[in-house]
Structure formats: C-alpha cells, structure tokens
Amino acid sequence: MGFARVDEVGGRAHLEQLSVQPASAGRGIGRSLLEAAIDRARSLGHRSMTLCTFVDVPFNAPFYASCGFEECAEPGRALAALRTREAQLGLDDLGRRVVMRLRL
C-alpha cells in the first residue's frame, strides 16, 4: 500500500520518499508510515528529521506541516547540495520545493 524511505543526509535522518498507492489514499497510511519513520529515527538517536518536498501540493508540504514539520530557511551544506541535485534533475521545473525539518 505504501512505503517510507529514510536516509541520512548530513548526519540527520532524512525522509527521502513517502509514497502511498492512490487507491489507498485518505486512510491514514501515509501518516502511519511517517510516524513509524519518526519513531525509528528517534530510536537511532536522531534529534531531527528533514525532507524536501513540493510547497503547493496538498499532500506534500501542507501534509508535513500538519505533522509538525517546519520550513527550514537555512538547511546546511548537505541539504543545500541535495537541493542543488534535485534542481539539476528537473524537480524544480515541476513546482516550488522546500526543505522542512521536524525536531524529534
């Protein structure tokens, strides 16, 4: 039905991908997957989790904000490099993106 992929970027837990099959949307699966990813990051000693997402897609930045993530104005070197790579891959052509962080 879905999955969450968490990597480490700059020594922090980073939610690389959260995906739920469209037919399963709206059932709380994404929120449950995110909560499990957050719990795992905490258990590994991480003090925050970051992610990069689209600002204007309702199930992206607004969803993460509802889960406590906040826009990160100064993402640091590793996340800035990740954002540069995303731009090179053309993601910024699809819509405005933002780095978000949740303190654990």
Image: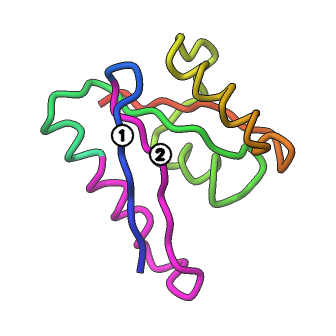
Q: Quadrant of residue 84?
A: top right
Q: Residues within 10 Å of mark 1 (few under 14, many from 20)?
A: some
Tell me the residue that label 2 is attached to.
16
Q: Is residue 100 above or below residue 61?
A: above
Check disc 1 and report its element: helix, strand or loop.
strand
Image quadrant where one finds the C terminus: top left
Asked if the stretch drawn in magenta spans residue 27, the answer is yes
Residue 57 in the figure: left or right of residue 21: right
Residue 100 in the figure: left or right of residue 13: right
State how far apart marks 2 and 1 are (Cα): 6 Å
Q: In the image, which residues are magenta? A: 12-37
Residue found at x 46% / y 40%:
68
Residue 66 place in picture, x, y as percent:
53, 49
Q: Residues within 10 Å of mark 2 (few under 14, many from 20)?
A: some
Residue 94 place in picture, x, y as percent:
83, 50
Residue found at x 53% / y 79%:
21
Q: Residue furthest bottom?
A: 23
Q: Is residue 95 above or below residue 25?
A: above
Q: Nearer the viewer, residue 82 or 68?
A: 82
| Identity, as a three-letter code, of the amino acid under mark 2 | Glu
Check disc 2 and report its element: helix, strand or loop.
strand
The answer to whether marks 2 and 1 mark residues whose Cβ atoms lie closer than 8 Å is: yes
Residue found at x 78% / y 49%:
56
Tell me the residue that label 1 is attached to.
7
Residue found at x 73% / y 41%:
89
